[in-house]
Image (spheres, grey):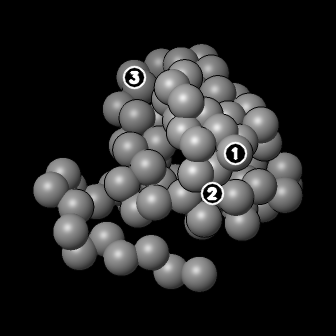
Amino acid sequence: MGRDFSKLKRPRYAMPDFVRQALDESGLMEAYQKRPAYQQNDYVGWINRAKRRETQEKRLRQMLEELEKGGVYMKMKHAPSA
């Protein structure tokens, strides 16, 4: 399911291969794709902006945990994904 990214006011971030691989391997790609375009973009941009690999991995783990749990987006409640 493709999301409409045309209304984003921020630059659209390209998904790095390691993020795509983690989503595929964890079986969470569908949960990621069901999120609104701005959330998909924010997660990828947030992970990409980390300077250290350890920080990227920590942020990636947080995203995966939130997708698995549902109802959470960047540590905030997100009822539509519950």
Q: Relative to the observer, which residue lies in front, 24 or 71?
A: 71
Expressed as whole percent of the image width and height from the top left, the position of residue 9 reads 15, 56
Label 2 belongs to which residue?
Answer: 32
Q: Amino acid at mark 3?
A: Lys
Image-quadrant location for residue 6: bottom left
Q: Which mark is residue 82?
A: 1
Q: Is residue 45 visible?
A: yes
At 22% from the left and 61% from the top, the residue drawn is: 8
Expressed as whole percent of the image width and height from the top left, the position of residue 72 reads 61, 34
Distance of label 1 from label 2 (alpha carbons): 13 Å
Element at badge 2?
helix
Q: Relative to the observer, which residue lies in front, 47 or 8?
A: 8
Which residue appears farthest toward the bottom when viewing the image?
1
Q: Amino acid at mark 1?
A: Ala
Q: Earlier in the sequence, mark 3 or mark 1?
A: 3
Q: Which mark is residue 51?
A: 3
